[in-house]
Image (tube, rainbow, N blue to C red):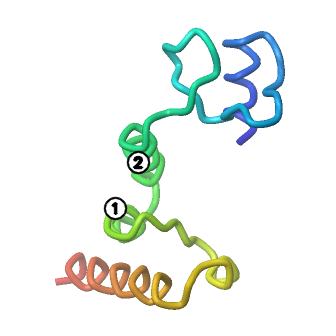
Amino acid sequence: MRQQLKDFRKKFGRDPLPGEPVFFDPVASVPTATSEAKWRQEMLEVLSDLPPQFAYAYAKTGLLLLLEEQAEHYPPDAVAEWKAAIGREGQRRRS
């Protein structure tokens, strides 16, 4: 988040205003939200530094749960799907 704020300040010369996207399209001349497809691709690139099951689970579910405490903020069925994805990919990597 700090890096995104730094990038925003560098691009637009100021802090983001309320309602402006911190994760912005770097080629736009005004603060414009990044497309969902681009956002997902960027997240997968960031996740490439983590064990592969995290990227797999994110790609499959759209959720990013790195800490058990985060699970309480999501519907139980979504958390179950994410945990199943982590388990399946982890099992594939061990075989």
Q: Give x and y (percent) for residue 27.
A: 49, 14
Q: Which amino acid does label 2 sit on?
A: Arg
Residue 24 drawn above or below residue 73: above
Residue at the image point whose x is 63% and y is 14% from the top: 30
Residue bearing mark 2: 40
From the viewer's perspective, tell me whether residue 43 is left or right of residue 21.
Answer: left
Residue at the image point whose x is 31% and y is 80% from the top: 90
From the viewer's perspective, tell me whether residue 34 is left or right of residue 81.
Answer: right
Q: Is mark 2 on a helix, strand or loop?
A: helix
Q: Do the residues labelled 2 and 1 touch (CB within 8 Å)?
A: yes
The quarter of the picture where the N terminus appears is top right
- Please tell me how crowded label 1 is: few (under 14), some (14-19), or many (20+) other residues with Cα within 10 Å: some
| 73 or 7: nearer the viewer | 73
Residue 34 drawn above or below residue 15: below
Residue at the image point whose x is 47% and y is 47% from the top: 46
The quarter of the picture where the C terminus appears is bottom left
Q: Give x and y (percent) for residue 6.
A: 74, 25
Q: Distance between the residues labelled 2 and 1?
A: 8 Å
Residue at the image point whose x is 39% and y is 37% from the top: 38
Q: What residue type is labelled 1?
A: Ala
Q: Give x and y (percent) for residue 19.
A: 75, 36
Dot label at residue 59:
1
From the viewer's perspective, tell me whether residue 88 is left or right of residue 65.
Answer: left
Residue 4: quadrant of the picture:
top right
Return the disc, 2 or 1, that comes first in the chain's sequence: 2
Residue 67 drawn above or below residue 17: below
Q: How many labels does the image show?
A: 2
- Please tell me how crowded label 2 is: few (under 14), some (14-19), or many (20+) other residues with Cα within 10 Å: some
Q: Is mark 1 on a helix, strand or loop?
A: helix
